[in-house]
Image (cartoon, rainbow, N blue to C red):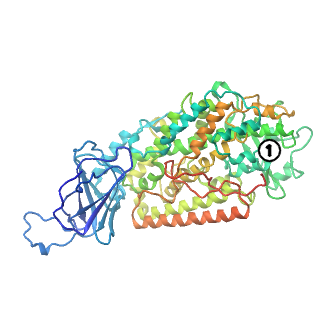
Amino acid sequence: MGGIVAKFRSDLVLVVKTGDRKGAGTDANIYAFIEDVNGNRNAETKLDNWLRNDHERNSTGFYTVPSEPKRNRDDKCEQSEQTALGKPAFLVLWRDRSGFADDWFVERVELRTRGSKQVLATWPLHRWIKADKKYRFAVNDCLLPQKDTSISQRLEELRERRGLFEMSQNFEGAPPQCRNPPLAAFPLDARELTSLRSRMEHKLISGSTSAWCSLDDLKNIYKLGFQEPSAIHCWKSDAWFAAQRLQGLNPTAIKLCTRLPECLSGSRNGGQISVDNLELERTMKEKKLFIIDHKILRNLPCRDDRMVVAPVGLFGVDTRGELRPLAIHLFPDAAADNVLFSPSDPPYTWMLAKMFFNMADAMIHRSWLWYGLCHLLPESIWVSANRCLSSSHPIYKLLEPHLRPVIRANSYLQCELMSPGGWMDSTTSIGMRGLQAIIGRAFEDFHIIDDLDIRKVITRNGTGDKTLKEYPFRDDALQVQDAIRTYICAVLEHHYLNPADITEDSELNRWCDEMSKSRRKGGCQIKGIPSPIDREGLLSLLTNVLSLASLFNAVYGSGQYDNLAFPPNYPSAMRGTIPRDNHPRTEGELVSQLPSKEATLSWISVIRFLSARPLHIFANIVEVHLSHPADKEALQALQWRLNQVKQVALLRGLLHSTIKFRPENVLHSQSAKEKLKTIIFFSKQYNII
């Protein structure tokens, strides 16, 4: 900008960080002054450095400000009698309309001493500053509405945001989303920078529509620059198939079997299904029998009216304490042509049954767990938070680094991948029609407290450590979620000093009401929102929301390539007839079921794109949102505890000779900063290679 040299000497410096969002920088003139706790203020200062273009996007500027209180014109006291400003209490900030680009997004402002560079006050603002409007922010900019003296400024902010963040039902039965996302309000996503490369890969593979000749032919695809996924070496193994239930893409589907469904009861081909020659009834009594029932897929409407399986799988714990598959029924009905498949079938017949089972598992993962649960639901929660919570609210600041990027990410996904006739339609058996049906069915039964609390899920499923001794997801996820809960508890204790602080928090209560309200009435229709809200209910809600945006996002997102990029392991589609007998199959019959070369390459290209998506590490938050010392201390405690969890998982992995999936990262958003290649949980080597 350039300007005149300041005509005063001072020991104070204002440090201003402009954000990294599109259009964040400005050429407008910026002004500020400080108020202390005694009501004194210094003179307003133009934040301008000589011969420098200030306030550019992602830049930091240092500006000298007066350290003495401003004198009134009628103040006759001598200069020597003036005292320095007291403890900072407020920052007043504004800009004019000059300059070519007058929008300005300020990320953070700090008041420091010149010599020691001691930080006297911090304002983590994360806001767009409008022209010709004076903003007044308390130190740390983190207050409950009933304690904020700038309430009119707060109410105006919420009125504006309710106009920007309107609810829209983009998918029938799904969580509502933002009607017209103000994308400039969200950070750039590195995935957009790589989308051109993804499109180029699609052009390179165009025309490759022929079928695969053999499994070796399929493996040649990885000579085109794709990394070999880990599953390529072990997908045939029953031990691997069982291990996927405990550490794969859907690790909460497995449940203790206390009663056999009709389709799995009785004899099969004159023999009994058993575990180590023990009858099923005895195995059930010993709590060593487990079941996965994908009944959500029953009579699923799919693209081109295709039929997909709704399988039931039976698993047992053997004398070594290891889980292994016992039987698969591809449909939940005990019809004459719905036969049971088991490891005693001819090899390729059993492999084919496992492939159909995993295709169903993959479609539930793709539709609900990854997209509906980890993308659409967080957007719904975040849209409502923007409508109901001020940027100065401590809960808004707690959620922002984890949820803010999801709206832009979802807009990109819907435009590029999840649109009719797009990638999902062209590479999967269910298509967008099936995806929407799965999301609608799952969301109808979803409960935000019961279904995201891992301890409750494990108890409900009967998969505690007394029944399943080796369960990597359970063992590590419980510790991570406990760490998140402890962190949130510390933050809440600092900002909500007594029960009245919660009941009198109008913004919090409005947010909870809107999330639970029906979609027809403009709400999110999320079941399980505590009402009336109290400290324990708020703690559970926030723990589960942050677990959703971090822990579950890692579980369902970070291992996609290793699991999904080799089609026989987790097929996206099966093109042939659903098997209804146990006759021997050949490798050729198995391969003929797989998607075409074009569809396979398209699938792998996008899965690599999604899996290599850079993601933040939860406890290494780059931007400061909660700046009070108590909040910083809570975050440091979280970082330490997560590191301890990682070390324990590392030790367990070394003792058991881990497979390639290694979790060193608990994620905190769908945004883009650091490349992540490893899955979240260390896991036992199952003798599969």
As drawn, is 361 to the left or to the right of 635? Answer: right
Foreground pick, 489 / 15: 15
Q: Position of residue 508 (x, y in %)?
A: 42, 52
Which class describes the residues within 10 Å of circle 1: few (<14), some (14-19), or many (20+)? some
In the displayed structure, does residue 441 sit left or right of residue 20?
Answer: right
Residue lying farthest bottom?
Answer: 80
* Residue 682 horizontal side relative to residue 129, left or right: right
In the depicted structure, whether residue 628 falls above or below residue 209: below
Q: Amino acid at mark 1?
A: Leu
| Percent of width and height locating residue 175 | 52, 39
In the rendered image, which residue does mark 1 sit on? 260
Q: Is residue 304 above or below residue 470?
A: above
Splitting the image into 4 quarters, where does residue 374 fall?
A: top right
- Judged from this view, the residue extending furthest toward the right is 270
The part of the image, by quadrant, that contains residue 86 is bottom left
Query: Is residue 298 visible to us here?
Result: yes
Relative depth, front residue between 107 and 151: 107
Instruction: Relative to 683, say whether 424 is above or below.
Output: above
Q: Position of residue 432 (x, y in %)?
A: 59, 31
